Image: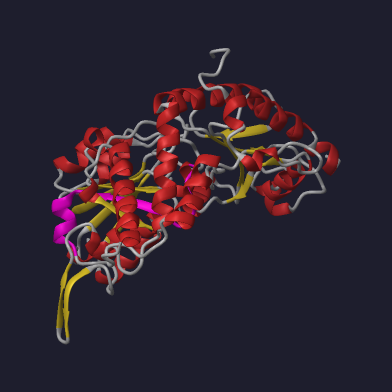
């Protein structure tokens, strides 16, 4: 493990107003960036500047303010597209990854027929499961590839389940529970060799590492702004333009049309065809500012810092007796996520079902006790219940790291975990 971080975390923290707060008379140790990231001043200022100087509806007015707002909106689209190696006419603004995947399931799903199959993995977030389940009503089958004991994707099982009926392959780039980084370049090649459309859930990858849709050859890529320093309520769907043009709109109304008559309408060009109604202009502007901030750090550096922190966290948490960590042990194969449980100690104080499942302390109790020291982690099933069932646990505690975390945060987590047994008298 390297001894020094690539990023100057102390300087970076100064850019985040919320990290100056005192909670329980302590500085916040925010370890829930997988759920949502904190926002730098540059993003906050960009949103305020939009509202103070440019607020108007876009694409509709011919007055100066509207034209300026439209220019900001479309420049944001282009900037965000460049960030993932895509042209702006293949970037659709949505609310989040969930909406992007629902859009594909609804619009591209209309092209599927009874007997078609969709192949995904057991490690997926609910957002990459539930939308596809809706298609079962028309006889489309959802198939799950399994994982190996170390939390990596079982490629033999994956290859064994893809076939000539597979029309869609949809996988997470990085698991929000296991931290597993899937080889989407290889998976995409396998999908395309079978003639399937390849979809990547990039919610946990685009914010943390260099992602280029041309290199991974994704037909669709979805990600959320709020997980990469941007505001909530803005997300991105990248889609190959020819595929987007073949799809029906997700919603109807203003903005997404070129003509409307009493008995029919004509759609606007891609990507506006998929952006019905007044868009989240300030969200796009804020996300563009977030992209600029990340670009100034360098995504290779962001990824390098993440590996550095994960390596240290695996070492420290792995030294704690009776802690089980889920997912790959190699920092090269995992993102900045560590899910864990206390295990294998018998106590009359714990619920019989938890004892049966080998869990000593419920993750909700762990998170509550850590919060006493202002150490903020996630607990629960993390919107990945099929994975929890596969792991045979009801829930986990999850710590996730980002650019404003350092070794001190890992040490704070380690020390706070050490207090859990004392508080619960186990």
- Quadrant hosting residue 288: top left
Q: Is residue 285 magenta?
A: no
Q: Residue at x 65, y 28 (%)?
A: 410
Image x and y of residue 188, in percent:
23, 39
Q: Which residues are magenta?
A: 229-247
Q: Quadrant of the C terminus?
A: top right
- With 364 as the anchor, is 62 left or right in this view? left
Q: Residue at x 40, y 61 (%)?
A: 130
Q: How many marks?
A: 0
Q: Which residue reaches farthest bottom?
A: 262
- Quadrant hosting residue 414: top right
Q: Which residue reaches farthest front?
A: 64
- With 159 as the anchor, is 352 left or right in this view? right
Q: Is residue 316 visible?
A: yes
Image x and y of residue 329, in percent:
51, 26
Q: Residue at x 16, y 54 (%)?
A: 243
Q: Which is nearer the eye, 64 or 81?
A: 64
Looking at the image, residue 254 lies above or below residue 128 = below
Q: Which is nearer the eye, 377 or 291?
A: 291
Q: Is residue 143 visible?
A: no
Image x and y of residue 174, in percent:
42, 38
- Quadrant hosting residue 406: top right
Q: Quadrant of the N terminus?
A: top right
Image x and y of residue 268, in percent:
18, 65
Colouring: secondary structure
């Amino acid at each position: 493990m390297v001894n020094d971080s690539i990023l100057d975390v102390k300087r970076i923290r100064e850019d985040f107003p919320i990290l100056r707060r005192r909670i329980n008379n302590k500085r916040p140790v925010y370890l829930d960036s997988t759920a949502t990231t904190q926002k730098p001043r540059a993003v906050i200022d960009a949103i305020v500047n939009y509202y103070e100087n440019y607020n108007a509806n876009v694409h509709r007015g011919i007055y100066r303010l509207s034209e300026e707002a439209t220019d900001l909106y479309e420049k944001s689209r282009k900037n965000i597209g460049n960030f993932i190696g895509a042209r702006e006419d293949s970037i659709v603004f949505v609310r989040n990854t969930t909406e992007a995947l629902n859009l594909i399931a609804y619009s591209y799903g209309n092209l599927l027929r009874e007997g078609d199959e969709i192949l995904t993995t057991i490690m997926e977030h609910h957002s990459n499961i539930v939308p596809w389940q809706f298609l079962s009503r028309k006889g489309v089958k959802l198939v799950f590839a399994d994982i190996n004991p170390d939390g990596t994707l079982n490629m033999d099982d994956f290859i064994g389940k893809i076939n000539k009926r597979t029309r869609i392959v949809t996988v997470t780039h990085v698991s929000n529970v296991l931290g597993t980084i899937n080889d989407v370049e290889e998976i995409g090649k396998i999908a395309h060799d079978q003639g399937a459309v390849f979809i990547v859930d990039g919610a946990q990858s685009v914010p943390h590492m260099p992602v280029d849709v041309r290199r991974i050859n994704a037909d669709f890529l979805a990600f959320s702004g709020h997980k990469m320093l941007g505001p909530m309520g803005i997300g991105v769907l990248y889609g190959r333009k020819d595929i987007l043009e073949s799809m029906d709109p997700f919603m109807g109304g203003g903005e997404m049309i070129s003509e409307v008559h009493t008995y029919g309408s004509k759609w606007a060009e891609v990507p506006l065809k998929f952006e019905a109604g007044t868009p989240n202009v300030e969200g796009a502007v804020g996300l563009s500012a977030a992209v600029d901030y990340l670009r100034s750090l360098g995504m290779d550096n962001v990824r390098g810092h993440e590996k550095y922190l994960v390596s240290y966290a695996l070492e420290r948490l792995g030294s704690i007796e009776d802690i089980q960590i889920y997912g790959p042990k190699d920092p090269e194969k995992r993102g900045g996520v560590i899910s864990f449980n206390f295990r294998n100690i018998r106590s009359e104080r714990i619920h019989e079902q938890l004892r049966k499942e080998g869990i000593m302390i419920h993750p909700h109790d762990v998170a509550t006790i850590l919060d006493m020291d202002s150490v903020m982690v996630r607990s629960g099933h993390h919107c990945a219940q099929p994975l929890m069932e596969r792991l045979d646990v009801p829930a986990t505690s999850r710590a996730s790291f980002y650019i404003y975390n350092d070794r001190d945060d890992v040490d704070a987590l380690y020390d706070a975990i050490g207090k859990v047994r004392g508080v619960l008298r186990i």
